Image: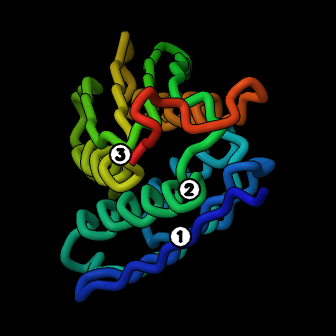
């Protein structure tokens, strides 16, 4: 069984080509035009053991918002496509990820019920050219389009880079566990019989 998904999303503002291999080795080939976002997406691939390919072009001369959000949309849809009906997955998982003084908890339910609780406050507005407010926009677009319930909570931390990176790493770890195939589960892990 090959759990792979690919989405090409094109609008008047952006073009995103995103591919997600669930059963990967942590390889990534990412070029969004936003170096900090590229670095964060590489964390998802490496620590979730996913193979990700993302190329994006967007109206960065205006703002990075459209590109960040649309990358989240495309990656969410690619993951959803890769998982199909979700038969055999563990579905629920949680993970803590530290980065020096920062510690973030991610809790994921690959449920078909899109929701984001984002409790990751960052005092600093910018990391280089990257607007830290866009982090929540990415996670919301991703969770809604992947059809997952996602809770991200900062337990403690001060350094903005450490906090944001710990959030991406925590997501990677939780998704790795939630999408793992459990040999005890033969069907869809829901009393409803569907994760749609």
Residue at 43% x, 42% y is 195
Earlier in the chain: of badge 2 and badge 1, it is 1
Q: Residue at x 35, y 84 (%)?
A: 10
Disc 1 secondary structure class: strand
Asked if one can make out residue 126 in the rendered structure from this viewpoint, the answer is no
**Residue for point 22% across, 28% down:** 123
Contact, CB < 8 Å: mark 1 with mark 3? no
- Whole-angstrom CA distance, mark 3 to mark 2, is 16 Å
* Residue 62 seen in the current view: yes
Which quadrant does the N terminus fall into? bottom right
State the image coordinates of residue 92 (x, y, percent, origin top left).
51, 24
Q: Return the residue nearer the eye: 112 or 108.
A: 112
Image coordinates for residue 84, horizontal then vertical, percent: 56, 56
How many numbered marks have been drawn onto this rendered protein structure? Answer: 3
Mark 1 vs mark 3, CA separation in Å: 15 Å
Give whichever of 97, 24 is nearer the camera. 24
When asked about the image quadrant of residue 129, the answer is bottom left
User: Neighbour class for label 3 at 10 Å: few (<14), some, many (≥20)?
Assistant: many
Q: Which residue is disc 1 drawn over?
A: 18
């Amino acid at each position: 069984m090959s759990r792979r998904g690919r989405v090409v999303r094109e609008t008047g503002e952006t073009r995103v080509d995103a591919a997600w291999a669930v059963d990967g080795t942590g390889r990534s080939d990412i070029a969004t035009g936003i170096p900090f976002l590229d670095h964060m997406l590489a964390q998802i691939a490496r620590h979730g053991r996913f193979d990700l390919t993302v190329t994006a072009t967007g109206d960065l001369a205006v703002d990075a918002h459209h590109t960040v959000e649309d990358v989240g949309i495309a990656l969410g849809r690619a993951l959803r496509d890769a998982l199909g009906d979700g038969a055999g997955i563990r579905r629920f998982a949680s993970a803590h990820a530290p980065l020096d003084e920062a510690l973030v908890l991610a809790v994921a339910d690959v449920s078909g019920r899109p929701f984001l609780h984002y409790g990751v406050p960052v005092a600093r507005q910018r990391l280089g050219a990257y607007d830290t407010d866009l982090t929540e926009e990415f996670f919301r677009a991703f969770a809604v389009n992947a059809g997952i319930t996602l809770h991200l909570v900062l337990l403690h931390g001060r350094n903005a880079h450490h906090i944001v990176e710990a959030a991406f790493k925590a997501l990677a770890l939780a998704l790795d566990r939630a999408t793992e195939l459990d040999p005890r589960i033969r069907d869809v892990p829901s009393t409803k019989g569907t994760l749609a």
